Image: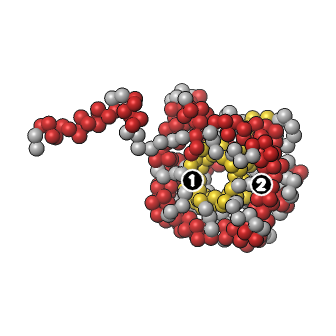
Amino acid sequence: MTTAQSAYPATRLRRTRARAWSRALHRETVLTPADLIWPLFITEGRGVEEPVGSLPGVSRWSVDGIVARAQEAAALGIPCVALFPNTPPARRTQGGSEALNPDNLICRAIRAVRDACGEDVGILTDVALDPYTSHGQDGLVDEAGYVANDATVEVLTRQAVVQAEAGADIIAPSDMMDGRVGAIREALEAKGHHNVQIMSYAAKYASAFYGPFRDAVGSGGLLKGNKQTYQMDPANGDEALREIALDIAEGADSVMVKPGLAYLDIIWRARQMFGVPVFAYQVSGEYALIEAGAAAGAGDRDALLMEKLICMKRAGAAGILTYHAPVAARLLNG
């Protein structure tokens, strides 16, 4: 091998990085606003904005504010918003019955966004009972304090139908009960909601990164115990693939890995193994760490958040749920 031949690969790499246009031309992974889903928190009232203390820059909005945020998403090229209610304490019960109220907070927000935005933006809704229960668990609790799987699935199925009938485009069960995807799919079909998608939280870990989210939906101070009996052990990877396989077999149109950054290996493995879109959720704790790090001078906020989002896309995520969605979209739109 000649000197020129041995030096060629390194020289070639330097040449392709030398100019911005060339770096763009050779970029292997491209992130666009169309890859983002914007999670939004709903609260009661009108003209209300309630900043979430543990999530700097994130607020709960009354329904009219949610509509404005959805319109903002459409203008930025963000194709979908995810809605999460902060149910008033007086409407939280042991059985989470408010989840089945067709005029509850999330259903009113769904209808308002649909009326204002038409088909310009998709609406994803969370199916779980933690925003509605007085104990903060995602399901029904039996006398021993254990979250009862089958009884919970029956309620979740009814909750999903209520949301679909309000106009939700994507039902996203985040509860991690066994068998709920199949039950929800069957119920949606029976009610004629053939085009309502299911994005399953198939690999949702019992993570320490959820604290600010629980503050935002008002369940954090209510939570009794933990969620380790139904959410996944952070030590397990093969189990995540089994969970994903089960949900796909039951009819999930797409699956989610949550959290995102700490579980890039799961995103990658799921993308390689299964032929369905895999979404990542950059959760509240991940968001808060970026904001706190930037505030402490650890790095540039925009650079930090964009690097984290692109790494999730590079790992195989078809899309990313992130509270940074509007910031990222503006950066990407230039």
Residue at 45% across, 60% down: 272
Which colour assignment does the render follow?
secondary structure
Of discs 1 and 2, which sits in the foreground?
2
Q: Which mark is residue 323?
A: none
Quadrant (top left, top right, bottom left, bottom right) of the N terminus: top left
Kindly indicate the quadrant of the structure image that contains residue 234. Answer: bottom right
Q: Which mark is residue 167?
A: 2
Kindly indicate the quadrant of the structure image that contains residue 35. Answer: top right
Disc 1 residue type? Phe
Would you say 156 lies left or right of 309 here?
A: right
> Considering depth in this image, is 91 or 31 the residue closer to the camera?
31
Residue farthest toward the right in the current orientation of the protein: 90
C-alpha gap between disc 1 and disc 2? 22 Å
Give whichever of discs 1 and 2 has the lower sequence position: 2
Residue at 76% across, 50% down: 219
Would you say 271 lies left or right of 249 here?
A: left
Would you say 133 lies left or right of 281 here?
A: right
Residue farthest toward the front in the current orientation of the protein: 119
Residues at marks 1 and 2 touching, judged by CB atoms closer than 8 Å: no
Residue farthest toward the left in the current orientation of the protein: 2
> Considering depth in this image, is 307 or 30 the residue closer to the camera?
30
**Is residue 271 depicted above or below 123 in this figure?**
below
Disc 2 residue type? Gly
> Can residue 243 be seen in the rendering of this structure?
no
| Residue that numbered label 1 is attached to | 279
Q: Residues within 10 Å of mark 1 (few under 14, many from 20)?
A: many
